[in-house]
Amino acid sequence: MITVTDVVEYCFCPRFAYFGGVLGLEQFEQKRGTVDAGKKVHKKYEKTNIQYIPSHVGKTTKKISETKLYSKIHGYVGKLDQGFFLEDNKFALLETKHTSWHHVGDTLRVQIGLLAVLAEENYNVKATKCIVVFTKDAKTHKIVPINEKLLSFALSKLYELKDILSSGVIPNATYDNRCVHCCYRNICSVGSLYSK
């Protein structure tokens, strides 16, 4: 079953998805300190912020946390950090990121979009925004509006990943700073060009 994380990794680098999804190679992410630290932050928030509702969410009728959802329409699964049912059949997401880089790039936009699709399909609501809380340095948040353009972009990445997984063809990629810390750099013809 394809997960939201799989699509985010594909968006990070198409070859990442190929090595993991087609070849079945493990990434050993537990060896990466930032991943482990992020998981600890998620666990802490899961246990300590049970009733907390941030003021910028709006008037809330119900809160959900750490909820796994499945899309029958698009065939993928994902887990909401937190979700808030708002008035007028609207819904807000809250995602926690353990990073000092306060940027909403393509990988985060894909994650937000796919989680919004899951919320809309499973709860029959209209997802309107996502509050992204950055926790590594001074706690900061950004509000990301959820619109049709964001949802379409996220779903397009899902279907691009599905094409790679079904065809088994290695996708093109270009070298950049992401390759330096990629767990597949030693076997990737692109990432290994500059690693030494």
Image: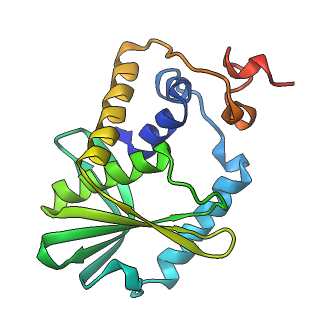
Residue 143: x %, y % from top left? 42, 67
Question: Would residue 114 be visible to someone looking at this image?
Answer: yes
Q: Residue placed at 38% from the left, 80% from the top?
A: 56
Q: Could you say which quadrant of the image residue 163 lies in?
A: top left
Visible residue check, residue 53: no
* Position in image of residue 159 (x %, y %): 31, 29
- Determine the image quadrant of residue 13: top right
Q: Is residue 89 above or below residue 157?
A: below
Q: Quadrant of the N terminus?
A: top left
Residue at 30% of width from left, 42% of height from top? 76
Q: Is residue 162 above or below residue 118?
A: above
- Residue 190 sits in which quadrant? top right
**Colour scheme of this structure image?**
rainbow
- Left or right, residue 24 beside residue 158: right
**Residue 79: image location, x then y, percent:** 38, 57
| Along the line of sight, the residue nearer the viewer: 85 or 21 | 85
Is 53 situated left or right of 105 in this image?
A: left
In terms of depth relative to the viewer, which is nearer, 52 or 65? 52
User: In this rendering, would 82 be left or right of 190?
Assistant: left
Residue drawn at 40 percent across, 45 percent down: 110
Q: Quadrant of the C terminus?
A: top right
Answer above or below: position of 135 versus 176.
Answer: below
